[in-house]
Image: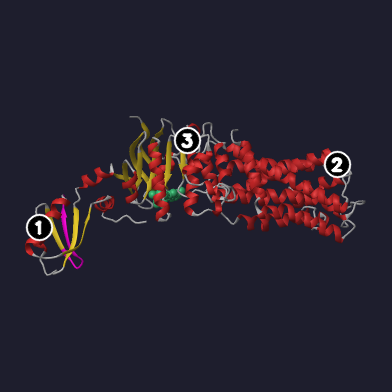
Amino acid sequence: MNSAIVCEHVTKRYSSLTAVNDVSFSVKEGEIFGLVGPNGAGKTTLIEMIEGLRTPDGGSIRALGLDPNKQGGELREKIGVLLQATSIQPDIKVKEALKLFASFYEHTVGDTAELLHTLSLEDKANSRFRKLSGGLKQRTAIALALVNDPVILFLDELTTGLDPQARRNMWDFVDKVRKEGKTVFLTTHYMEEAEKLCDRVAIIDYGKIIALDTPRGLIEQLGAESKVIFKIEDSDMDAAKFESIKSVSRAEKSPDGFTLYTRDENAALQGLVRLADKQGFRLTSIRTESPNLDDVFLTLTGREIRE
Amino acid sequence: MRGLWQFTLAELRLNLRNPTALFWSIAFPTLWMSLFGALFSEPMPGFGYEGLNYANFLLPAGISIVILASAFIGMPIALTTYRETGVLKRLRVTPLKISTLALGFTISQFLFIALVIVVLFVVGKIFFDVQVLGSWLALLGMIIFGMVTFLSLGSAIGSVVGSWRADAVITQIIFIPMMFLSDMFMPISIFPEWLQPICHALPLTPLNVILRDIVYGVPIDNLWQLGILGGWLVAGAVVTIVFFRWE
Ligand SMILES: Nc1ncnc2c1ncn2[C@@H]1O[C@H](COP(=O)(O)OP(=O)(O)O)[C@@H](O)[C@H]1O
Ligand SMILES: [Mg+2]
């Protein structure tokens, strides 16, 4: 399969700060690729270098085989971009904006009404951009990014600042785009979002890519264990007792209850229930926690990812 | 030049939707001409123009104000706002060329100013029966020359001013003093001698003087003033090209 984007040793400095530090990776055609990291990690700098908005200080970038700085005109025909903070002329109406942006491209989707429909913007076609809510602005910005039927869609902070409902709408939308076979390059600082949407995820911290794999792969590679968390009614019990359960590697007691660490949630749960049965204690509020990308980030950096 | 027409049209439409632009460009000069035209009947002494009524004397100044307001207030504010809010950045990731953007922006301002001048004329004609004694062709040519020069200066200001509070700075430091110093409200001869050369070098002075000469049918003997205007045109274009930033 061909690569839609190839970055080799890409570096960008702002005076003394190295915002992107010797980054290499490639994105396959048709892939949903996520760049994940905390604020200030260098996501926007990197994505905007690929879009040709910023010039790297070192390394090389190819998008669809083109150099974003030297062949920017040709590249821009084929990409759609959602900037981190998009703004268009505040008093322009949604349908006017679509028509305007469509006029910039050689090849367009043809039917902008269809685009309005895809993003559920039909009712807002005659609204001015500045009067729209955050979620509607974001949807309008995406409609504009899709107006040229792009080969690669860049989405910088797709859901930042959106309420949970609007965020879920965006996720559904990315699923639609995936089915159309477009390549998507997105950034986010929500691990959950990356895990849910992306085929592959690159974790970036202080300008360096510190891990890159499928979400599953990252979690497995980490070797993190699932947790089984529960309480018992007579909590006067020793945590060590649970370590006899098959597949449980470690047990901890805290004021909140007990936590068992395991690589096999199923076996641990069964063993726990059997033990409770045999010893005659009552289990309450049982839940399990699978390791997720947040744990991956925590393990790799020793910090929690925060907004 | 793909997108030029749509971009020009969109910007023109947005101008007509913008209350600030509408006030300064249409309401202010029209009201000003009407108010003073109704209050006084004779031209201000000291300018040496005679014959036509006061509103007619104000008409060329009104045209200058329209051009000045659109080019120095409307356009730089639009440009700085577009830059600060990321509109220019968004346009930059489309295939729209910077030359197309600049041209479309200029043409839309041009059409907007032309429209406003027509309004000014119609109001003047209906209420004060204003006349043009000189050549209409010369008037048109001068208006176009003035528009191009001031749009060039306006885009230079928009390029340099960057992130300051552009509107306040431009109005207070450039716009208002220039209106007083450029032979518009009071003749330059009332100012101290050291100030007079500066007055003559301002871009607005030649525009005022020549427009008025044409309206009064005075033979134009001040061609050197066209040179001053031309100099400002070139200077504005150079500054725009050197300092223009997308972000
Ligand atoms: N234009 C700029 N000039 C100077 N520093 C910048 C500029 N853009 C970003 N930075 C700095 O570079 C780092 C990375 O920023 P950015 O790429 O925006 O990160 P992210 O998108 O991951 O939040 C930050 O420390 C930021 O302050
Ligand atoms: Mg960012």
Distance from the alpha carbon under mark 3 to that under mark 2: 58 Å
User: In the image, A130: left or right of A82?
Assistant: right
Determine whether the beta carbon of the residue marked 3 sits less than 8 angstroms from the nearest atom of ligand 2: no
Residue A216: percent from left, percent from top = 25, 44
Instruction: State the separation of the CA atoms marked 2 and 1.
Output: 108 Å
Residue A307 image-quadrant placement = bottom left
Per the image, is A262 magenta?
yes
Type of residue at label 2?
Ile
Q: Give whichever of discs 1 and 3 has the lower sequence position.
A: 3
Is B133 on the left-hand or right-hand side of A154? right
Q: Chain of mark 1?
A: A
In this orientation, which residue lies closer to the viewer: A303 or B220?
A: A303
Residue carrying label 3: A149
For the N terminus of chain B, the image quarter is top right
Label 3 resides on the chain identified as A
Is residue B163 rendered to the left or right of residue A149?
right
Is disc 3 surrounded by few (<14), some (14 to 19) or many (20+) residues within 10 Å? many
Report the residue marked by disc 1.
A274
What residue is pinned by disc 2? B220
Chain of the residue on which disc 2 is drawn: B
Element type at mark 2: loop
**What are the residue bounds of the magenta stretch?**
A253-263
The residue at 21%/66% (across/down) is A256
Q: Is residue B24 above or below residue A12?
A: below
> Which amino acid type corresponds to the residue marked 1 in the rendered image?
Arg
Residue sitting at 53 percent across and 49 percent down? A123
Judged by its main secondary structure, the magenta piece is strand
